[in-house]
Amino acid sequence: MTPSKETLLNRYKQIKPYLHRTPVLTSTFLNEKSGANIFFKCENFQKMGAFKMRGAISAILNLTDQEKQRGVVTHSSGNFAQAVSLSAKLLGIKANIVMPSSAPQVKQDAVKGYGGIITISEPTLRAREEACQKIINKTNAILLHPSNDLDVIIGNASSAIELLEDQPDLDYVLSPVGGGGLIAGTALAAHHLGSNCHCIGGEPMNVDDAYRSLLSGKIESNETSDTIADGLRTQLGNINFPIIQKHVEAIIRVEEEEIIAAMRLIWERMKIIIEPSCAVPFAAVLKEPLRFQNKKVGIIITGGNVDLSKLPF
Amino acid sequence: MTPSKETLLNRYKQIKPYLHRTPVLTSTFLNEKSGANIFFKCENFQKMGAFKMRGAISAILNLTDQEKQRGVVTHSSGNFAQAVSLSAKLLGIKANIVMPSSAPQVKQDAVKGYGGIITISEPTLRAREEACQKIINKTNAILLHPSNDLDVIIGNASSAIELLEDQPDLDYVLSPVGGGGLIAGTALAAHHLGSNCHCIGGEPMNVDDAYRSLLSGKIESNETSDTIADGLRTQLGNINFPIIQKHVEAIIRVEEEEIIAAMRLIWERMKIIIEPSCAVPFAAVLKEPLRFQNKKVGIIITGGNVDLSKLPF
């Protein structure tokens, strides 16, 4: 079931032409502050501004020709919507996007800009799923899941593959944990391509379903979605969870104020715009200085699509 | 009087070890929006977060040993203060910094972090100069001017030198115009090292002293300092003005809302944090699409030291 090293590398070769090779940035100041040697893999500079491009192009490229003709549909509050729209546009197929009415205007605009056909739904999971189903009934479009899909997971792995090409001797690679699609791909890359590289997730304390799932051995839910890390409110799925159980060493939970402080530090010191979600792993490194002391630590900076009208500082 | 090509290149060689080679970024979206082919030279990723590092290290490196022992002093509301503090620290000499009480806390903290000795003054030019004079009387320190100093100008030229190394066939290079130290250096680099590369300045309409100075042939003042581009409120000096008269082709003035819109576009689309001042040249390109249509345009992104608590959006 677990994708092999060859699967990962072949897929990476296939999707590479559709992606930016994102830079890896470092900061002397943040290294001194954390005590670790941190390599930030900047997916905020990826096409459409987030790593989600990797999974979306991977999934759509691997549809059959017949499936491609039917078009795709997904529901997403943001980055996956943009990723599917742009990937579909690059491959000349139709993309229907169900967005909750709560989705930031900047993300709705971007989806439109990439040619996605938007349907607005109530911001509940049920309403989103129903809206998708209506579109499928009408168009026979293929439903794409943003995180619980093996093609998405394998595509997501390509970020850590590139990071390990640049820094082969990483001791750790960290990503945030939301729906589980990125951490699963990252863990696979660390397992197959790292040299004793351990994968660790960062998760907001308020939505620590993944932490609790690893404890209990079954997929747990969140009772609230109350976190600034809006990309991490979702829960794990049956495809990514077994990979996470097998290949993720630990999940470190952080408080809201730790996320905001970490985000602000990166903005102020690195002069790059990152989403709150991707400040979570850096906050995790700051929270456990002993674990990461003098270690080489890769962090996937997942995206930079922020609504500038709603900043936490 | 005008520094030669050799002077520029020799100085660049001398200061290079103390600087980051900053990246040149592009954006398909912003190219489509502007109709030009824009190359952003990202001094927001420079040491201490701004191009001012180039002029400061150039000036301090070229003091005599005896002058170095006396230490340096400057008054600055921000970036030059940090640049002098860090340059002095790297060269093991003492830096006294007079900062107006209105200087953002983040800039005061950075100066302290780089080891500068801060004296807070009232935020008038006279109070700042008096505070400097007191320090000079006491310590015999060398006064450094942030823009009207030939060593600073020659140091500042190094940003456009690197940009022209990367993109030798630029049609235009743009920088903002404040005190005149950056545009003078940039114009010298374009003149000596470009292949028919024209230097153009961007200036806020509210503080258009440089525009009016070029018209009248003498250094004009501003009646207000009312612009969001806080780095551009100062006026030209007798050393940089002749260089600007000779080598700057035009100055394009932009309104406050054009500056804010240009800044927001760069933040949202390029995911980099830039100061309002360096959105001015990009706003100028957007304002005159015909002039820049299909041209290769370099823009010096001057810095990224923004007080995140006081954003215009």
Image: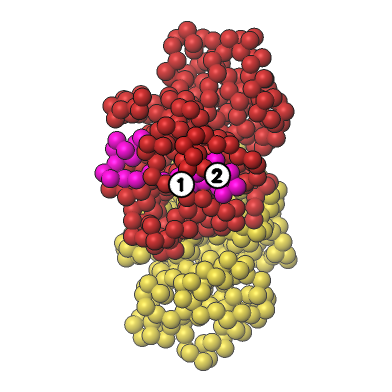
Chain colours: A yellow, B red
Q: Position of residue A132 (x, y in %)?
A: 56, 83
Residue at (42% x, 46% y) in the render: B250
Task: Count up the numbered dots.
Answer: 2
Query: As displayed, is residue A214 above or below residue B75?
Result: below
Q: Position of residue A82 (x, y in %)?
A: 50, 69
Task: Give whichever of discs 2 and 1 has the lower sequence position.
Answer: 2
In-image side of A171 versus A226 (left or right)? left
Please report the bounds of the magenta region as a residue range. Answer: B188-211
Q: Which residue is mark 2?
A: B208
Does the magenta segment cover residue B207? yes
Foreground of the two, B144 or A91: B144
Residue at (43% x, 81% y) in the render: A94
Q: Position of residue B11 (x, y in %)?
A: 35, 25
Q: Chain of mark 1?
A: B
Please, what is the three-letter code of the amino acid marked with disc 1? Ile
Discs 2 and 1 share one subunit: yes
Residue at (58% x, 36% y) in the render: B221
Farthest front residue? Answer: B216
Q: Chain of mark 2?
A: B
Farthest top residue? Answer: B66
Residue at (58% x, 9% y) in the render: B140
Q: Quadrant of the N terminus of chain B?
A: top left
In-image side of A37 versus B31 (left or right)? right
Q: Which mark is residue B251?
A: 1
